[in-house]
Amino acid sequence: MDMTRLRGIGVSPGIAIGEVLLAKRVVFTSRKEIIADDQVPDEIKRLHQALERTRADLARVKESVREKMGPDSSLIFEAHLLILEDPTLVGGLEAVIRDEKARAEWALSKANARYEQLFESLTDDYFRQRKSDVSDVLKRVYRNLETKREKEKAPQKQHILVAHELLPSEAALRLSKELTLGVVLDVGGGTSHTAILARSLGIPAVLGLRDVTRQVREGELIIVDGTDGEVIIDPPPAVRREFQAKKEKYENYGRELQKTAKLKSETLDRVRFIPQANIELPEEVDLALSMGAEGIGLFRSEFIYLRRESLPTEEDHFEIYTRLARSAHPYPVTIRTLDIGGEKSLPQLNIEKEPNPALGLRAVRFSLRNRDLFRIQLRAILRASAGKNVRILVPMVTEVDEILEVKDIFEDVKKELRRKGEAFDEKIPFGIMIEVPAAAALADVMLKEVDYVSIGTNDLIQYYLAVDRSNEFVSYLFKPFHPAVIRLIRSVIQAARKAEKDVIVCGEMAADTPSAIVLLGFGLRTFSMNPIFIPRIKKALRSVECRTAEKIAEETLKLRSAQEIEEYVTEEILLRHPQVFLTGQPVEAAPKK
Ligand code: PEP
Ligand code: MG
């Protein structure tokens, strides 16, 4: 067979070269096998035995994931067990067997088709992707209908896992740091469970390849380039050598970069900066610290709600925040209150669909309308602050009155805790996100009401340039270096510095090398980003002089377009501090002043 090159979505960086291990696929039957009347009770019994086996399997998976990755990661299997207990689901399966005199396989196939249709009709991307959770459970039951099912043997040697789709439970069980060199799937995107898991285990992965399972054979040699989103089937020796070299270079660079974790966060001219991490799960704290994070600059608390079926209780919140605060201690942890509403609706609540969700009842607007929920979260954050390293952050503020209202509630919750004799940090820093242009324009006024501000460039750019951040048709217009954007961000940084209050940038812009240097030049010192980008940004900032960054940043204000700015900044950095862009070079080799 000749070499085939396929393009997909690179969701976990790195390169893997190895032999294909094709995962078996469960295909629901499309044939309705009819049974006799007197066989119905036995068939229902057969269904229940499969349900029972699935329950036992899931409990086992849950336990093993809990051990490997902590209690929060195993929550998904709690949800799967609940799906399995759902009387509507089980009653519906029995009804099909009884009424249609059909095999259990047919009942499951019908149920799966119905749920698929239901989930496909949802507009919310996150919940559409949850279709795979129900499907995961139904497929497990389907597989468990075969009593003498040939167990797929656990692989003994290193391999590249190729599958149509990996159900969440399969991903959690099958992906192993030691044996899985890479992952390749027909389906899936960047926010799928497999992607998240592959990234946290450091396994290169390319998803969304459509029909790769039909193009490869078991045992065939394949290359996975998770950085560029490419898969190469049956590469000739020359291509293999090329990628082997690329792999070594990538790994060397990674090792060198990671050494920065232990080095001081300061520029060549000894100006101190603070790299921090944006995380969604408490389990990510360890990874963040190992990458050199000096604190959690953003904990997106909405994931607590999105990962469970029912509303989290105060104790659920408290447990998660306490774990976060303890694992990051003595570094600070910034807990952002619920940023949900509009597009990211909560399944636990009946939130009405809005015509224009990005401009709707989001974030703090939602919290102020749902005060009981808000108070629960505030109480838990306060209680978790007793160790004095928790900061609170309120998203999407548009006007001063919102800050005052939140502060009123916050003070009231504090009073309640004092009355009950509960410990909390009386000096807990209170901050807001600057992500609506109006808030940026009013930053000097808002700063009087808060202890610090955090600039969310993802939303700020979306709203300032009127470019939907998740619409690929206009993504070419989403420009962090748009002259209007950098002026606005500079004004917020300057206002914060004048007010002698902390300012953080926690949008994606902080993780882009040229942008980070310009932000440094504008006076920013705290950069919060996805942990995997910290070593790169730390190395870049360690390789420049702050003085130079200031000059470069000031010059950008004279330019008229994002392209001019981007070119200017890149050229200047290359000229003055080429070390910033060099890959594979020892970090220590950076010229010292
Ligand atoms: C932002 O808007 O830049 C931000 C960090 O928040 P999120 O990406 O969660 O909206
Ligand atoms: Mg935002």
Image (cartoon, rainbow, N blue to C red):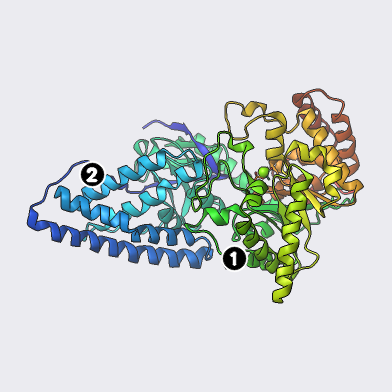
Task: Report the front residue among 264 and 335.
Answer: 335
Image spot of residue 463 (x, y percent):
69, 34
Task: Return the residue nearer the eye: 571 or 223.
Answer: 571
Q: Tell me the number on the disc at residue 314.
A: 1
Residue 329 position by quadrant = bottom right
Question: Is the residue indicated by label 1 positioned so its CB lies within 8 Å of ligand 1?
Answer: no
**Residue shown at 67% from the left, 59% from the top:** 290
Residue flagged by tag 1: what amino acid is it?
Glu
Is 427 situated left or right of 468 in this image? right
| Figure quadrant of the N terminus | top left
Which residue lies most toward the bottom here?
Answer: 421
View quadrant of ligand 2: top right
- Residue 175 placement (x, y as % from top left): 46, 55
- The one nearer the camera, 157 or 50, is 50
Q: Is residue 191 left or right of residue 509?
A: left
Q: How many marks?
A: 2
Q: Quadrant of residue 77?
A: bottom left
Q: Residue at x 86, y 44 (%)?
A: 445
Pointer 2: what residue?
A: 29
Residue 270 pos. (x, y %):
89, 51
Q: Amino acid at mark 2?
A: Thr
